[in-house]
Image: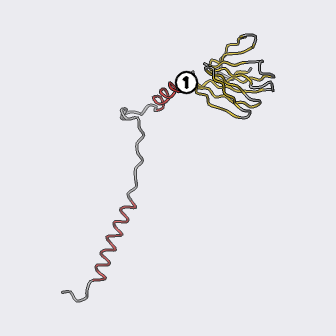
Amino acid sequence: MMLSAASAAMVSDANGTPGATLLQGTAVFSTANAKAFVLHASTADIRPGTDAPTVAQVTYVNSKELVVRSTRGSLSITVDGETQTVPEGTAYRVILDPDSYLETTVTAAQGPAGAGADRTRNRPLKAGRSRFLLIAIVITGVATGIALYEALESPHKP
């Protein structure tokens, strides 16, 4: 196992299987069989899916979100008794608690609004509409109407 800069992990040995708990940052691990290593991150357990050589990268985003990438071999991710497989050469964003994650994301998605902004509305402003085309059609219609009136007017006015 290798940790990137500003990462932290606790190494452990549970039930005879070496493992580690990723506390922050990114960890890359490589194994030769399925029972050689398990990486715990928040409530997820990430291990090789088969006995084939496996290389994986796990990034701890926060306690509710991980990014799991398999560069060689497949991975098995177990969260609350449910297991999913990450095929070789793919990456997945893993949401560990979708209900509370959505609440946190929705409230935190809008950053600071700046000085003097209306903070009661968190919706983006509507884009302005250009009225140039509407004004051009009205002016052209009026000009055409005047031209037709003048052209069709009788030379002998009553």
Label tally = 1
Residue 6 picture quarter: top right
Q: Residue at x 62, y 22 (%)?
A: 79
Picture coordinates of residue 82, whole percent (x, y): 63, 23
Image quarter in which the N terminus is found: top right
> What colouring method underlies this structural image?
secondary structure
Picture coordinates of residue 98, whole percent (x, y): 54, 27
13 in relation to 88, above or below: above
Q: Is residue 114 left or right of residue 40?
A: left
Crowding near pointer 1: few (<14 within 10 Å), some, many (20+)?
few
Q: Please state which amino acid type lies under the numbered disc 1.
A: Asp
Q: On the image, numbered disc 1 is attached to which residue?
A: 97
Residue 84 picture quarter: top right
Q: Which residue is drawn at 44% across and 31% down?
A: 112
14 in relation to 66, above or below: above
Disc 1 secondary structure class: loop
Picture coordinates of residue 143, whole percent (x, y): 33, 72
Q: Is residue 43 left or right of residue 28?
A: left
Q: Which residue reaches farthest bottom?
A: 156
Picture coordinates of residue 53, whole percent (x, y): 80, 26
Q: Which residue reaches farthest left?
A: 158
Q: In this view, does 122 lie to the left or right of 41?
A: left
Front position in the image: 51 or 70: 51
Image quarter in which the C terminus is found: bottom left
Q: Residue at x 41, y 45 (%)?
A: 126
Front position in the image: 135 or 67: 67
37 in relation to 104, above or below: above
